[in-house]
């Protein structure tokens, strides 16, 4: 599809790398494409970054018809820019679209517009250690009527934000609170989809945890409140004895691309990895008897984030004395090494622009 380009007449100054944080700055342009039932996707454009004009009855404002993705472009030492497993994000976005009754985007078209947009904005990819250009594709329903139904009109967009680390802690261990009141998602619901509603439902518990000094919550399953699911913006893994355990994808957990990549790296290095149900009782016992050796979260924004402290029902457990563990460090070094082009990508995950 041809993309119509309108360049900004007021280019912004690029922020200093030390001030980046996460999602505070945006590039000069954004990608927009429209969908109508019967017509398909049309009107692909790169336009100056700016506010949208939306009909007050637009579906997304009332019924939450919205999905999004998150991936990054990385600047290598030789100056080239590359993306990490973008096709996986496109496939997950289409799975989310299917769940929310939003239109899917043919993979070739989605890859085309994503790569063209990133090429167009690539100068915004920062180069300091640990920084990247975070890409946020998203889609929303915008029928201009109040009836509740599968949408007939939708908009797909991509915005980009130069970022540093997601947590202020960087690679230092974070404190996580195990949530025993609210639930994030249930089987049969939208947990496996990356839709805004899941995050809206998470905010109350997240806020409570933050007030107590924790970075995020670790969710338990929505039926029995017994099995570990995931953290607010990351999947989780635990080294218990000599087994690396991560919750199985039962439908209420986001199938993370970092999670999948960790599993592939770990298996390639001979670690024993189990995707299975992990109950809070099993985890508590492992914390009590010292068999829990390491815990970490994994996600695009946070990369690999060591968990140094877990709190459950006001009981506080230190993990690995609050230090980053060997396996966590190995995963961080391997994934960031591949992402920033410092080590060879033997998995075929990198797409160079
Ligand atoms: N779980 C949730 C709820 C998330 O928001 C994210 C971040 O995208 C992840 C897990 C990790 O997914 P990924 O590794 O694809 O970024
Ligand atoms: C990501 O890691 O890309 C995410 O989407 C997390 C986000 C909710 C900040």
Image (tube, helix red, strand yellow):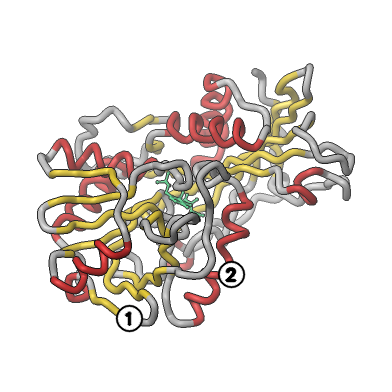
Is 71 positioned to the left or the right of 50 in the image? left
C-alpha distance separating marks 2 and 1: 21 Å
Position of residue 187 relative to residue 318, above or below, is above
Q: Residue furthest front?
A: 224
Q: Callout 1: 10 Å neighbours few (<14), some, many (20+)?
A: few
Measuring from the top left, give residue 338's x and y in whole percent: 26, 41
Q: Position of residue 128 (x, y in %)?
A: 36, 56
Give the mark toward the camera: 2 or 1. Answer: 1
Q: Earlier in the sequence, mark 2 or mark 1?
A: 2
Q: Secondary structure at mark 1?
A: strand
Looking at the image, which residue is at 39% across and 57% down?
A: 302
Instruction: Kindly identify which residue carries mark 2.
Output: 204
**Residue holding disc 1:** 315
Q: Quadrant of the C terminus?
A: top left
Q: Quadrant of residue 9?
A: top right
Please state, as top left, top right, bottom left or bottom right, where the N terminus lies in the image.
top right
- Horizontal arrangement in the rendering, residue 244 relative to residue 203 (left or right): left
**Where residue 202 sits: x, y (%)?**
56, 62
Label 2 element class? helix
Question: Is the CB of the residue bearing disc 2 within 8 angstroms of ligand 1?
Answer: no
Residue 65 position (above or below residue 97): below
Identify which residue is drawn at 29% across, 45% down: 276
Residue 239, position as x, y percentages in the image: 18, 57
């Amino acid at each position: 599809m041809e993309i119509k380009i309108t360049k900004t007449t007021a280019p912004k100054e690029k922020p200093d790398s030390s001030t980046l944080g996460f999602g505070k700055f945006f590039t000069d342009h954004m990608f927009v494409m429209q969908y109508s039932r019967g017509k398909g996707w049309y009107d692909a454009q790169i336009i100056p970054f700016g506010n949208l004009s939306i009909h007050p009855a637009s579906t997304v404002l009332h019924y939450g018809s919205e999905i999004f993705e998150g991936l990054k472009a990385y600047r290598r030492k030789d100056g080239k820019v590359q993306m990490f497993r973008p096709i996986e994000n496109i496939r997950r976005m289409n799975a989310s679209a299917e769940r929310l009754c939003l239109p899917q985007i043919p993979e070739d078209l989605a890859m085309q517009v994503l790569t063209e947009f990133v090429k167009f904005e690539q100068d915004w990819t920062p180069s300091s250690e640990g920084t990247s250009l975070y890409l946020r594709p998203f889609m929303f329903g915008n029928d201009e009527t109040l009836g509740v139904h599968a949408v007939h009109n939708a908009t797909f967009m991509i915005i980009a934000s130069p970022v540093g680390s997601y947590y202020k802690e960087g690679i230092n261990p974070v404190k996580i609170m195990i949530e025993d009141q609210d639930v994030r998602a249930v089987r049969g619901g939208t947990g496996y989809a990356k839709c805004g509603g899941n995050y809206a439902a998470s905010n109350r518990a997240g806020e409570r945890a933050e007030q107590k000094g924790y970075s995020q919550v670790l969710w338990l399953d929505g039926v029995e409140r017994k099995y570990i699911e995931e953290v607010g913006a990351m999947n989780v893994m635990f080294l218990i004895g000599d087994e690396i355990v991560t919750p199985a994808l039962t439908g209420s957990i986001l199938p993370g691309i970092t999670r999948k990549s960790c599993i592939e790296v770990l298996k390639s290095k001979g670690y024993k990895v189990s995707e299975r149900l992990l109950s809070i009782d099993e985890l508590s016992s492992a914390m009590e008897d010292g068999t829990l050796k390491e815990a970490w979260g994994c996600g695009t924004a946070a990369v690999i984030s060591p968990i140094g402290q877990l709190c459950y029902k006001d009981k506080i457990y230190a993990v690995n004395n609050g230090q980053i563990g060997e396996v966590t460090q190995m995963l961080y070094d391997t994934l960031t090494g591949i992402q920033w082009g410092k080590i060879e990508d033997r998995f075929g995950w990198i797409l160079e622009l």
